[in-house]
Image (cartoon, rainbow, N blue to C red):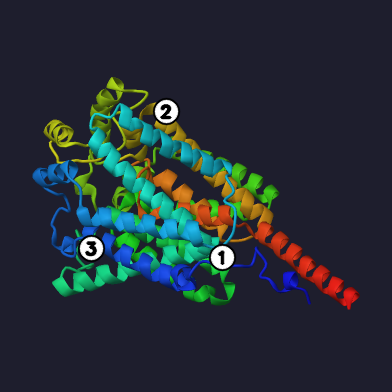
Amino acid sequence: MSDASQAPLMGDSWISSATPKWLTSPIVLTVFLAAVTAIVFFTEHDIKMSQSQTFVAEIEDQESWAAGGNKFRQIAFLSCAAIGTISLLFGRVGTFRFNLPVVLIGCYILWAGASTQWSIDSGTTMRRYLLVLCCVIGCVGYSRFLRVQDAVFAAMMVSLAYLTLGVAMELFFGSFRPYIGEYRFAGTMHPNMQAANLAMGSIAAWVMARVRPQAKLIFYGLFGLLFLFLILTKCRSATGAVPVALGIIWLASQPTRNIFIGVLAGFWVVASIGLICMVSGFDPIAEYQEVLLMGRGEETGSSLTGRLPLWQDLSEYISRRPWKGHGYRAFWNPRHIYEIAVSQQWVISEAHSSYIDATLQLGLIGCTIFILAELCTLFYAAICFRITQRPAYLFIVGGVVFCLARGLTESGMSDPNAPSAFIFLALAAHSWKSDRLLEHTQRNNTERVKDHSDNDRDFS
């Protein structure tokens, strides 16, 4: 056989012959990534968080956080960028395919970078924007070694790791008391942040039960465990968003005719229930308020736990810079935190709405790009599932729906965080290599080997 037929095929080679194999092996990169994750964990998590009574930092602490950065956190993100750079330079041969969601996400990132030109604090914007770039480079590079279902499995395992350590810390400090009415599971982070991670893991476990049906009982059990602790966080937005996400996942997996019938039937059911309640004078919200508020009724008035007055106050700041905003992650500086804390009579360093926070940071233009990117990712992932019938794409569908729903009353979805990072990692893994592209490449490679064999046989 000729030398050409013995050479490794480009589509199947993990690394080039000139690259040290140990440098780009998945094991080495995974260990490196685990070390980075550990650094981020110990710089952003508080092992004594569960001992807090209110989970609200003092205004001096929040002002200090807004004024400076964490050196270890910066090292962690730089290491993440190093992983991505190594993977991009020496990883397996392939082409990154720019689809519409990736383009819109890129536009959002570029607009965030451009905001350094008009930011009220250019130094803060530039520093935090560089961290975003490091995260993006790490996700795009590391995704070369992953399939979409690998990202789904990783999301579930990270959530389980946070849950395990959180329960261990609460047991160690004696703060794990779910039998007390005011208890909220926190673990090593604020209950709302813990809820986002648990919700991400719940959706991932639900999808993994379809990816690996032979082990579906195990994954459904993990889903039940994660969702149980999600309820214990008493975070209404995240807990309510998960059933919505699972409902959309179920709807997306149905035949087109059933989807149309289901949406129409759901509309008429909701309308009928509303009409019956109006005629009978029955108020379901009032009757089941304690259930809807998950035992936190004492914190809630008639204005979404103080959110409506907060949003009304923040609208005045938006009107000052409606189109471009105050600069990426530059609005919540010590001065604004103090002003809003005095006005609202409670310490606050976020808008409790991802969309209002995005508007404060990047204006109406940036918020519009952010929403379009999420919607396009949702529909693109749904189309990929309909074409390939690969359940892993449903994680992207459910994850985006969760982010859209939770973003109505919670911040963070427009900034780097675990749920958005794993959704982007799954999307990037798809962009490097789709199942159809792999099958086409493998078919061509098989035909090429066969042609070489036939030519050698004819020559002999």
- The residue labelled by disc 3 is 42
Residue 82 point in image, percent of width and height: 38, 58
**Which image quadrant is residue 281 in?**
top left
- Which part of the image, by quadrant, shows the N terminus? bottom right
Circles 3 and 1: CB distance less than 8 Å? no
Q: For the residue marked with disc 1, what is the amino acid?
A: Ser
Residue 285 point in image, percent of width and height: 35, 44
Question: Which residue is at a point 36% across and 61% down the rendered structure image?
Answer: 198
Q: For the residue marked with disc 3, what is the amino acid?
A: Phe
- The residue labelled by disc 2 is 365
Circle 2 residues within 10 Å: few <14, some 14–19, many ≥20: some
Question: Tag on residue 362?
Answer: none
Q: Which structural element holds mark 2? A: helix
Residue 357 point in image, percent of width and height: 32, 36
Q: Quick check: can you spot residue 117?
A: yes
Question: Tag on residue 16?
Answer: 1
Left-right relation of 29 to 453: left
